């Protein structure tokens, strides 16, 4: 039975991944969440109705928690893992509109805090998850000839898009995502000979909001749309749904080969981020 681990499964794209993948009863799906009690009730209800879905607690930045989670994963998969989906990420909206030189004087210390917080979760956290589960992934590759590590990234981490659309906001998040691309490339180079595919993929601009937008949120979104349309004037400015995004990404994954390892592509299978 194909086995999957999805991090950040408590809501948004992570929840949608486990929902769609577990529709196939032949898949064994493990969703990693930081805290069961704060996860979507829909996720916990889904676990009750689908015997092939298992929810495991783990903070991706905590080595002890990850070690314990790997032990749980082994019980469900028999010690192997076909596909890891790194979805967990930090995407704080509180200061996402700030430019790197635009932090107010009384908040300048927050720039370093934001940079470190994003790097800790979006880069170090992903590396820790990969390293923790790598023995299971390599076991699958040895037994069946291939395995996959899929890491969600963002067009905001793409240098070309940044220059093309003149994106100056979201520095800490974007920088962490750019660093993550190189980290995944490092793994791809090392494990290509073992037929383990490492792929970075952008889900597109997705509406994962669980509450009605505030006036401030709408204003920030309008600014973001205008910025992106500098580089992509034909984009209509409408976000896609988690269901649309995950469906598109899973379709892209179907056609992956070892020749794709190390690539950074969008949910459309190319470099079209929006």
Image: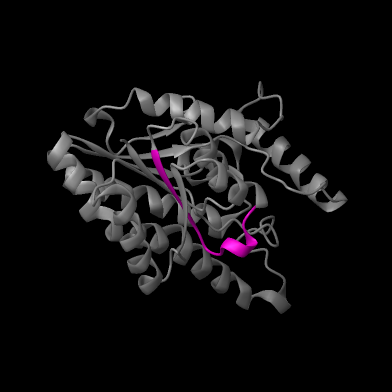
Q: Is residue 55 magenta?
A: no
> Which residue occupies 71% across, 46% down?
209
Give yes or no for residue 39 being in the magenta stretch.
Answer: yes
Q: Quadrant of residue 19?
A: top right
Question: For the point 62% across and 57% down, which residue is it?
Answer: 39
Q: Specify whether 51 is left or right of 110.
A: left
Residue that lies at the very extreme toward the right in this rendered image: 215
Q: Count the numbered circles shown.
A: 0
Measured from the top left, where is residue 239 in percent x and y? 68, 33
Q: Please give the name of the residue rendered at 41% of the width and 71% of the height, measured from the top-left corner.
A: 62
Residue 32 rendering spot, x and y as whole percentages: 46, 55
Q: Which residues are magenta?
A: 28-40
Q: How is the image coloured?
A: one colour
Residue 65 in which image quadrant: bottom left
Q: Is residue 105 left or right of residue 183?
A: right
Q: Nearer the viewer, residue 234 or 54?
A: 54
Q: Answer whether residue 11 is visible to the viewer in this image.
A: no
- Residue 78 position, x and y percent, is 25, 50
Q: Position of residue 127 (x, y in %)?
A: 34, 59
Image quadrant occupied by the N terminus: top left
User: Is residue 23 placed above or below 181 in the rendered structure?
Assistant: above
- Is any part of residue 113 visible from this angle? yes
Residue drawn 34% across the image and 50% down it = 76
For the C terminus, the quadrant is top right
- In front: 127, or 24? 24
């Amino acid at each position: 039975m194909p086995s999957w681990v999805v991090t950040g499964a408590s809501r948004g794209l992570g929840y949608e991944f486990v929902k769609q993948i577990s529709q196939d009863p032949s898949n064994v799906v493990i969703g990693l969440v930081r805290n069961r009690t704060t996860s979507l009730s829909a996720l916990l209800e889904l676990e009750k109705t689908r015997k092939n879905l298992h929810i495991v607690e783990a903070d991706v930045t905590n080595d002890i928690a990850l070690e314990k989670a790997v032990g749980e994963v082994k019980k469900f998969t028999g010690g192997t893992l076909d596909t890891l989906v790194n979805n967990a990420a930090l995407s704080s909206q509180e200061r996402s509109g700030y430019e790197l030189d635009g932090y107010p004087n009384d908040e300048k210390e927050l720039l370093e805090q934001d940079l470190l917080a994003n790097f800790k979760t979006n880069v170090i956290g992903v590396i820790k998850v990969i390293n923790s589960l790598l023995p299971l992934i390599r076991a699958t590759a040895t037994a069946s000839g291939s395995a996959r590590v899929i890491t969600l990234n963002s067009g905001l981490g793409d240098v070309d898009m940044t220059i093309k659309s003149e994106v100056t906001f979201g520095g800490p998040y974007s920088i962490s995502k750019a660093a993550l691309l190189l980290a995944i490339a490092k793994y791809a180079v090392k494990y290509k000979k073992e037929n383990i595919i490492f792929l970075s993929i952008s889900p597109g601009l997705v509406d994962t909001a669980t509450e009605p937008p505030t006036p401030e949120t709408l204003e920030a979104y309008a600014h973001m749309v205008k910025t992106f349309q500098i580089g992509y004037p034909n984009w209509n400015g409408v976000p896609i749904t988690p269901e649309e995004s995950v469906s598109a990404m899973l379709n892209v994954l179907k056609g992956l080969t070892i020749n794709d390892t190390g690539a950074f592509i969008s949910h459309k299978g190319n470099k079209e981020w929006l």
